[in-house]
Image (spheres, rainbow, N blue to C red):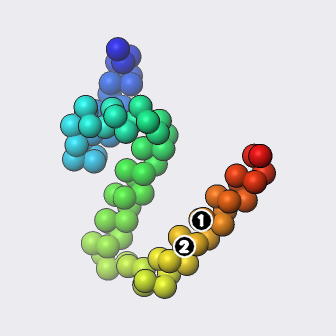
Amino acid sequence: MLTPQLEKRLQKLAKAAGRTPEQMLKLVAEYGFPVIEDYIEKVGRGIAQADIGELLTTEQFFSSIEKRRGQRLVSQKQAA
C-alpha cells in the first residue's frame, strides 16, 4: 500500500501523463519516481517548446542522442 504522499505523487504523474494511476504505478515500480517524474517534465517541456515553434532539426536531434549515449557509456565504464 502506498503512503498518502506517494499516492498524491502518483496521481500528479498520472494526470500529467494522461494515464491512469494504475498505468503509472507499473512504470514507477519498474523505473522509480524520479526517473518517471523527470521524463514527464521533459515531455511537457518539449511539447511547450513545439507549441511555440522551437523545434530541433533532425541533425540536432540525432547529435543529442549520440552525445547522451556516449555519456551513458562513460558512466557505465566508471561504475564497473
Task: Give the distance between the C-alpha atoms of the residues marked 2 and 1, in whole angstroms.
Answer: 6 Å
Residue 79 to residue 10: above or below: below
Q: Which mark, by number, is residue 28?
A: none
Which corner quadrant of the image does residue 43 belong to? bottom left
Residue 46: x %, y % from top left: 37, 65
Residue, x 44% and y 36% (percent of image)?
30
User: How many residues crowd mark 2 within 10 Å: few (<14), some (14–19), many (20+)?
Assistant: few
Examine the rendered structure and indicate whether residue 36 appears above or below residue 43.
above
Percent across and percent down for residue 62 are 50, 77
Q: Nearer the viewer, residue 10 or 79?
A: 79
Within 10 Å of disc 1 (Cα), the crowding (few <14, some 14-19, many 20+) is few
Side of 71 relative to 12 (left or right): right
Q: Residue at x 35, y 14 (%)?
A: 1
Residue at 71%, 54% (x, y): give it.
75
Q: How many marks?
A: 2
The numbered dot on residue 64 is 2
Measured as percent of width and height from the top left, residue 76 is found at 70, 52
In the image, what residue type sits under mark 1? Arg
Instruction: Examine the rendered structure and indicate whether residue 73 appears above or below residue 7.
Output: below
Residue 41 at x, y = what percent? 40, 52
**Mark 2–mark 1 contact, CB under 8 Å?**
yes
Q: Amino acid at mark 2?
A: Ser
Residue matched to label 1:
68
User: Does the rendering let one see residue 70?
Assistant: yes
Q: Secondary structure at mark 1?
A: helix
Name the side, left or right, on which 80 lies relative to 19. right
